[in-house]
Image (tube, grey):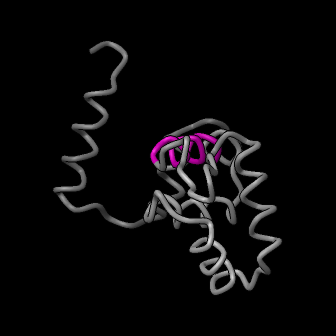
Amino acid sequence: MKITYTEKKFMDFIWAHEPVRSKEIVEYCRDCFGWKNTTTYTFLKRLEEKGIIVNDSSTVHSLISQSQIEEDVSREVISDGFRNSLPLFLTAFLNGQKLSNEECDELMALIKSHREDS
């Protein structure tokens, strides 16, 4: 699922506060984005049409978890920006930085648990 930066920031608020009243979302968007009420309600409607949220009697609930969206965004970044190569992504991400022994151990355990032959 494609989600924009603004949609992600918007959804971060919903995930942190759900179920959340649309009035609270309007206040958040006014403070965070400088939006008018109508802009926020249009945005809510768009997310509802995309199947990301449901607005039931002015109470908003997510239909997609934060981890699902983050997984999709991560896959898209690696696919579009790094020729679908996780090693190329990690090389660019680390850019000469050193990992602690604990970080190396965590990554090795993660890799081992996701190997195709295990």
Residue in the picture at 76% in, 80% down:
35
The quadrant of the image that shows the N terminus is: top right
Instruction: Say which quarter of the image contains residue 49.
Output: top right
For residue 40, above or below residue 112 = below
Residue 108: horizontal and vertical position, in percent?
25, 40
The rendered magenta stretch, by its main secondary structure, is classed as helix
| Residue under the point 82% across and 72% down | 38
**Does the magenta portion include 72?**
yes
Tell me the quarter of the picture where residue 7 sits: bottom right
Q: Residue at x 74, y 85 (%)?
A: 34
- 73 and 28: which is toward the camera: 28
Left or right of 97, for residue 54: right
Q: Residue 78: x and y, percent?
A: 60, 43
Q: Which is nearer the eye, 46 or 86?
A: 46
Q: Is residue 83 left or right of residue 113?
A: right
51 left or right of 15? right
Span highlighted in magenta in the image? 67-77
**Residue sitting farthest toward the front:** 57
96 vs 4, left or right, is left
**Quadrant holding the C terminus:** top left
* Rendering coords of residue 24 (x, y %): 57, 74
Q: Is residue 85 above or below residue 105?
A: above
**Total tally of numbered discs in the picture:** 0
Residue nearer the viewer, 29 or 91: 29
Q: Does the segment drawn in magenta span residue 4?
A: no
Q: Find the residue positioned furthest to the top.
A: 117
Look at 57% across and 37% down and name the residue there.
Answer: 85
Which quadrant of the structure image shows residue 52? top right
Residue 103 x %, y %: 24, 55
